[in-house]
Amino acid sequence: MTTISKVRYSRRSLLKTGGAALAASALPAPMVWGQETKDITLRQFGTGVSNLNEVAQKVKEDLGFTLEMTALDSDSVTQRAATQPDSFDIADIEYWICKKVWPTGNLQAMDVSKIRRYDQIVGIFKDGKLTPESEIAQGTAPHTVGFIPEPGATSFADEQTNWMTLIPTIYNADTLGIRPDLIGRPINNWSELLNPEFAGKASILDISSIGIMDMAMVCESMGEIQYGDKGNMTREEIDATFAIFTEAKRAGQFRAFWKTFDESVNLMASGEVVIQSMWSPAITAVKSRGIPCVYQPLEEGYRSWGGGIGLSKSLSGMELDAAYEYINWYLDGWVGGFLMRQGYYSAVPETSKDYMTENEWGYWFEGKEATGEITNPFGDVLAQAGEVRDGGSFEERMGSVACWNAVMDENQYMVRKWNEFIAA
Amino acid sequence: MICAVAQPGHGDLAPGGDDMTDQATPIALEDTKPARRAGRPSRHLTGWLLASPLVVVLAVFLVLPIAMIVMVSFWGATEWSIYPAFQFDNYAFLFGSDVTYRVFFNTVKYALITWAFTLLIGFTVAYFLAFHVRSLGWQVGLFLVCTIPFWTSNIIRMISWIPFLGREGLANSALLSWGVIDKPLEWLLFSDFSVILAFVHLYTLFMVVPIFNTMMRIDRSLLEAANDAGATGRQTLWHVIVPLTKPGIMIGTIFVVTLVMGDFITVRFMSGSQKANVGRLISNDISLLQYPSASATAVVLLITVLIVISVLLRFVDIRKEL
C-alpha cells in the first residue's frame, strides 16, 4: 500500500526515544513524524464536490504527505465504501451514505479528543441545532449518525460521545434552480416543479435517495401528501409520491432526468430545462457562462445535505496519525475558505474567515451585498458588486432546512419503486 | 479492429490453424512414443492438449463468470451486503412486476427497429461498395472512410447528437430558419427517436462490414450467368445476391441485436434517463448494490438473447456458409 519501512513507530514512542524527535516536538505538529511522512500516501475517494486536486496539492505543501483523490458519484461511493474497504484510507461521504455504510464495519470511529477544533464545529453536526432554538429537520440529520457509543460499534449513539463517525467537511442547503429569464415570474414554492406551465421543461435528479426528497418537498407543497417524516416514509407515502410523479412523467412534464453535475449544468444552460433540482455549484457554473440562473429560496425551506470524512478500518499506525493530522488541518480554515468561496459551508466557519476577504465573507456567509467582484477560487467571476447571495446569510439558509438527505427504513422498496418510475 | 475482422480474417484463419497443428505435432510425437506401445489413448491426449488452452480460457473467462451470475441471482441482499441463499425472490419480483415486461418489450423494440435500419443502410452501403465501385483500391479506400467515425469513442459520437438535436440545437434552428416548422420539435431529443438514431449511427458499421465481406466473396461469374439467363437487375439482387449474402446479414444481425440488447449507456444519455431498457435496469440495480436482483435480470436477458440468436441461426447455417 505505502512504502513505509517495516519498523513502525508509534508517535509516542518516537517522542520518548529519538533525539531527533525531541527536536521535532518543538516544531509544528506535522513535522513530528519526520522523514517517513513524505512517503505516506493516503487514498481518499468521494463525491466530486470536495475531492479537489487543489486540496491534495495544499496537503502536500503543508503536511508533506501525498493525498490521492478519486471522485465518483454518490452511488459508486456507497458501493465502494460498502464493498471494498481496502481500496481507500479516507472516505469522503455524505451523512446518509454513512447511515448505509457504517453497519458494514468498514469504517473506524474517530477519537474526538484528537480533534483540536471539535468545540468549534457547528452545532448541526453535534446536537443537531444550529442555534439553541432551532428545530431539528426531518431526514438523516447529521448528528443522528455522527456518533457511536464505543469503538467497533455498528449502531449509532443518540447523543455526543467521544467517538465520531465522520468529521463534517462540507454542507449546503439545496433548492430548485430556475432560469428567471425564461420563466419571467416569481417562483416561491416547490410545487412549481410540477406546474403544467413548465411541461417538457422540468427536470429532477436520477439519484433515488436525493430525488425522493425533492419529490416529497414537491408533493407536500402541492398539498397532496402530509408526510409523517419525509426522511423515513411509509410504503403508502412512497406509493402516493411516485403515483403523482409517474402521472406527471407520462404527461410529459420532464424533459430529462440528470445524474451528474455536468448534465444538470448543460440542461439548464442550453435552455432545455427552466426549472429543476440542482446543486449550488451547478448554478454558479451556469452563471459563469453568462446565463442567468437563480438558486431559488422557497417557502417550504431547503433540502440539506452534509458530507464528512471517515477513516477506513484498515488505517493504523503512521497512516492513522497522518489521517488525524489531515483532519485537523481540514478544520484549520484553508479548505473551508476554498469551499466557501464556491458557495458551500465549512464545519468550522470562523477559521475559514481568515482565508477569505471581508467582501467574500460578507457575500457568502453573512448574506451582505458584495462590495466588489466575487470570484471563485478558480478565478471565474460569480457576482458583481451590489449583488446578494440567493437565500441570504448562513443562518437564514441553514436555519430553514426542511429535511436532510436520507436513507429510509423502506429504502429497498423505495429503490424498486424508483426503478419503476424511471421505466414508466 | 473492425477491418481485421472483415477481410484479412479469413486469410488468417487457415494458416493459423496450420501453425497450431505444426507446433503440436512434435509434442504429440514425443508423448506418443511410450503411449503408442501402450495402446490408443495418445490421440485423446493430443486432442485434449490441443483443446486445453481454449478450454481454460473459456472456462475462466466465460463459464465461471456466468456460473457466478447465475449463482448470485438466487442470493439475497440487504442495503449494503449480499448473502448466500437459495431463494427465488429476485425472480419472483422480476416476473411479478409489469415494469419488467414493459422494459423487455422496450428492449426488443429498440433492437428490432435498429436492426431494420442498420440492415437497410448497411446492405445498401455494402452493395454500393462491392458492386458499383470497380477498383479494389477505391473499394478499400471507401471502406476505410466508413470506419472514420470509429476513430473517436462511442460515447463522444453519441453525446455529440445532444447539442445538435436540442430545443435550441442546430437541427431545430435550421428547420426554423427554413420555415419548415414554427416552433422547435421537442421529440428530436430525449425520446425514442434520439435513442434509435444514436443506435443506428453507432452500429450500422457492424452491419456493413460482414455484408461487404460476404459480397466480395460472391463469384462474379454468377452475376454474369444470371444476366445471360435474362434476369433483371432486381431479380439478380433478390435471387442471387441476397441468398449468397445471408451469412453476412446474419453475422451483422447478431452483432447489432446483441449490442443493442445489452446497451444501457446510449439509452440513458439519449433519452435523458427517461426511457429504460434491460441494461438500465441492471445498471440501476448494481449502482444501488442490489447485485442479486441485477444478476437475476442479467440471467433472464442472457436467456432471451440466446433464444434470439438460436432462432437466427435456424435461418442460416453460418458455419457451413463461411
Image: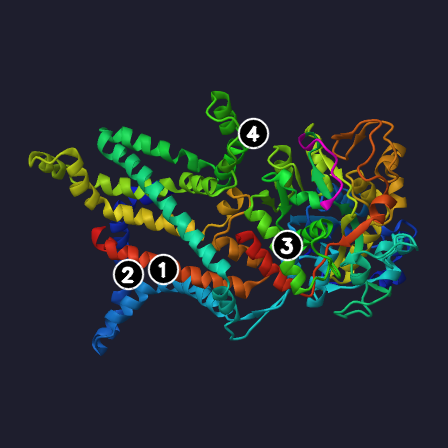
The subunit letter for the residue under badge 4 reads B
Q: Residue furthest left?
A: B229
Q: For the residues marked 2 and 4, what is the alpha-carbon distance in whole angstroms?
A: 64 Å
Residue A189 falls inside the magenta stretch: yes
Is disc 4 surrounded by few (<14), some (14 to 19) or many (20+) residues within 10 Å?
some
Q: For the residues marked 3 and 1, what is the alpha-carbon distance in whole angstroms?
A: 32 Å
Q: Amino acid at mark 4?
A: Glu
The subunit letter for the residue under badge 2 reads B
- Which contiguous range is marked in magenta? A182-190
Q: Amino acid at mark 2?
A: Ala
Q: For the residues marked 2 and 3, what is the alpha-carbon distance in whole angstroms?
A: 57 Å
Q: Main secondary structure of the magenta part?
A: loop
Residue holding disc 4: B168
Is disc 2 surrounded by few (<14), some (14 to 19) or many (20+) residues within 10 Å?
some
Quick one: label 1 or label 4, which is nearer the N terminus? 4
Q: In x, y percent, where is residue A317? A: 77, 62
Question: Tag 2, which secondary structure?
Answer: helix
The subunit letter for the residue under badge 3 reads A
Q: Which mark is residue A208?
A: 3
Question: Tag 3, which secondary structure?
Answer: helix
* Residue at left offset 19%, top offset 38%: B237
Q: In x, y percent, where is residue A108? A: 76, 64
* Residue at left offset 32%, top offset 42%: B119
Residues tagged 2 and 4 counted as in contact (Cβ below 8 A):
no
